[in-house]
Amino acid sequence: TFEGIRKFVGTIVDSGAIPIVMGGDHAITWPCATAVADHYGHGKVGIVHFDAHADTGTDMPGSLASHGTPIRKLIESGAVPGRNFVQVGLRGYWPDRETLDWMDEQSMRTHFMAEINRDGFDKVLERAIDEALDQADHLYLSLDIDVADPAFAPGTGTPEPGGLTSIDVLTAVRRLAAEVGIVGMDVVEVSPPYDDRGEITALLANRAIREALTGIAMRRKGITERDYLHPYALGKGKDSQGNDRNQVFRTKPSPSL
Ligand SMILES: [Mn+2]
């Protein structure tokens, strides 16, 4: 299966397109990111990895290629070296000390929720963007939906309380796609059978992909400035008659009201 995924994603990236892969569990990041690294060169691709979990295990109950091991596989194979990883949102009772030491030896850059809670998400996102710009010729984005708090994404296999808000996730994806630029992306760990409360997990995954597409479009239009927002999104700007929008909203309520 993995070889099939690697070949298929390779076909997409070789055509010049940007593969956006919807999982499925996180194991697929191994073949997907390998295919992207095959195209751009092993060691040339960086990954910003949003996740509650580091996914750097040696194995999970007997399986060497499970959803807890893809990051270690990418590092050990040489496709994506440890120093090319920027991880955001880690929390919970894992990894153990031995695994954390191994991650340090690989020079991985990790941002735990503790840092985000202390300094605020905006500051940590700035650090992650700086690290992504510094480390990678080509950026791959891996979004494990469980990086979001279970309040925003309950439909996932290994929920971990104390995570990001949905607006944190959406903002981060758009900014990375616009300001750094991405060559590939996956969104993983959405589990429809567990998503029975208004399908909010699937909605978040869908919107994250739309934000990525928006960021890609912004970059193609040359909009790569830091934290760009369209004037209309800020409540400024002119309407088609040249009136200030705020002025119009204040002085001319819609007739339908
Ligand atoms: Mn994961």
Image (cartoon, helix red, strand yellow):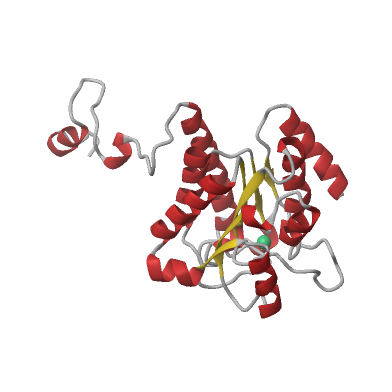
Residue 232 placed where, x, y %?
A: 30, 35
Q: Is residue 50 left or right of residue 255?
A: right
Q: Quadrant of the C terminus?
A: top left
Left or right for 90, reference 5: left
Residue name at image x 46 percent, y 69 percent: 115
Name the image quarter holding residue 42. Answer: top right
x, y percent for residue 14: 75, 30
The residue closer to the viewer here, 127 or 143, is 127
On the image, the x and y values in percent for residue 247 come to 15, 34
Where in the image, quadrant-wise, is ligand 1 located? bottom right
Question: Which residue extends farthest top?
Answer: 241
Q: Is residue 225 left or right of residue 1?
A: left
Residue 12 figure quarter: top right
Tell me what residue is drawn at x 40 percent, y 71 percent: 118
Give the percent coordinates (x, y) of residue 219: 49, 32
Residue under the image location 44 percent in, 59 percent down: 124
Q: Nearer the viewer, residue 82 or 48?
A: 82
- Give the vertical position of 227 relative to 15 (above or below): below
Q: How many marks?
A: 0
Q: Quadrant of residue 248?
A: top left
| 61 in relation to 108, above or below | below
Looking at this view, name the residue that lies furthest to the left.
251
In this rendering, the answer to whether 82 lies above or below 158 is: above
